[in-house]
C-alpha cells in the first residue's frame, strides 16, 4: 500500500520532528510497508532515546501519542490516495482521435454552428 523507501520514511520523520529517531528507523530498515504495519510495542522500541550516560530511555507518553497521531494521519492520506487511484482507474478511457478525425470533427461542429446561425437569421 505505501510504497515508500526507507529514505522517504526518514524524510517523513524529519518533517514531523522525529529526527532524533532517524538512525534507529534506518538501522531497522523501516520502509513504508513496515511503517504502515507498526504496532504500539514496535513504536515504543523505535522511539527509544539514549541518555548521555548511554542508558536507554523509554519514550514519553506525549511522544508516543504525537507519533501515533502523525502515523494515523499518514495512513489516512495513503488510503485516500489509494482510493483516488482506484477511482481513476475505473473511469473508462475515451479513445484518442487521430489528427484527421479531430480535424473532421471540428469542421463538422463548425458547419453545424454555421447552419444554426443561418436558421436564426432567417427566423428573425
Image (cartoon, rainbow, N blue to C red):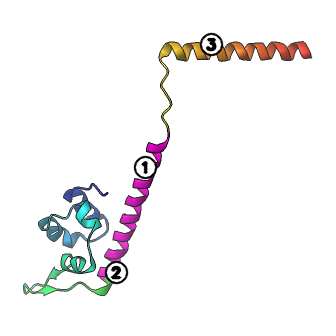
The one nearer the camera, 100 or 117, is 100
- Dot 1 lies on which element? helix
Q: Report how many numbered discs are placed on residues in the image.
A: 3
Q: Which residues are drawn in magenta?
A: 63-91
Q: Which residue is rendered at x = 23% and y = 84% of the image?
A: 59
Q: Where does the N terminus fall, quadrant-wise?
A: bottom left
Q: Earlier in the sequence, mark 3 or mark 1?
A: 1
- Assign a secondary structure to mark 3: helix
> Residue, x 37% and y 74% (percent of image)?
69
On the rendered image, what quadrant is the C terminus found in?
Answer: top right
Residue 65 badge = 2
- Classify 99 as above or below 6: above
Task: Pick whichever, 51 or 6, lies toward us.
Answer: 6
Q: CA distance from mark 2 to mark 3?
A: 64 Å
Task: From the top left corner, tell me how far across and down residue 65 is, in percent.
Answer: 34, 80
The residue carrying mark 1 is 86
Q: Dot 3 corresponds to which residue?
A: 107
Prevailing secondary structure of the magenta residues: helix
Q: Position of residue 87 (x, y in %)?
A: 47, 48
Looking at the image, tell me whether mark 1 or mark 2 is earlier in sequence order: 2
> Is residue 51 placed above or below 77 in the rendered structure?
below
- Cα distance between the residues tagged 3 and 1: 37 Å
Residue 92 higher or lower than 56, as above or below: above
Where, by quadrant of the figure, is residue 25 drawn? Answer: bottom left
Please state the horizontal and vertical placement of residue 122, each as a whole percent of the image: 89, 12
Q: Is residue 117 left or right of residue 70?
A: right
* Residue 74 lies in the magenta stretch: yes
Closer to the eye: label 2 or 3: 3
Which tag is nearer the camera, tag 1 or tag 2?
1
- Say whether residue 19 is left or right of residue 54: right
Q: From the top left corner, tell me how far across and down residue 53 is, in percent.
A: 7, 87
Amino acid at each position: 500500500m505505501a510504497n515508500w523507501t526507507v529514505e522517504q520514511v526518514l524524510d517523513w520523520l524529519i518533517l514531523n520532528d522525529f529526527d532524533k529517531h532517524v538512525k534507529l528507523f534506518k538501522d531497522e530498515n523501516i520502509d513504508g510497508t513496515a511503517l504502515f504495519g507498526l504496532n504500539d510495542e514496535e513504536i515504543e522500541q523505535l522511539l527509544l532515546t539514549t541518555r548521555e550516560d548511554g542508558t536507554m530511555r523509554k519514550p514519553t507518553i506525549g511522544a508516543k501519542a504525537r507519533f501515533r497521531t502523525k502515523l494515523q494521519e499518514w495512513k489516512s492520506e495513503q488510503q485516500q490516495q489509494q482510493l483516488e487511484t482506484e477511482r481513476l482507474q475505473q473511469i473508462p478511457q475515451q479513445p484518442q482521435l487521430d489528427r484527421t478525425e479531430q480535424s473532421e470533427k471540428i469542421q463538422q461542429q463548425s458547419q453545424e454552428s454555421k447552419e444554426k446561425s443561418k436558421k436564426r437569421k432567417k427566423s428573425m
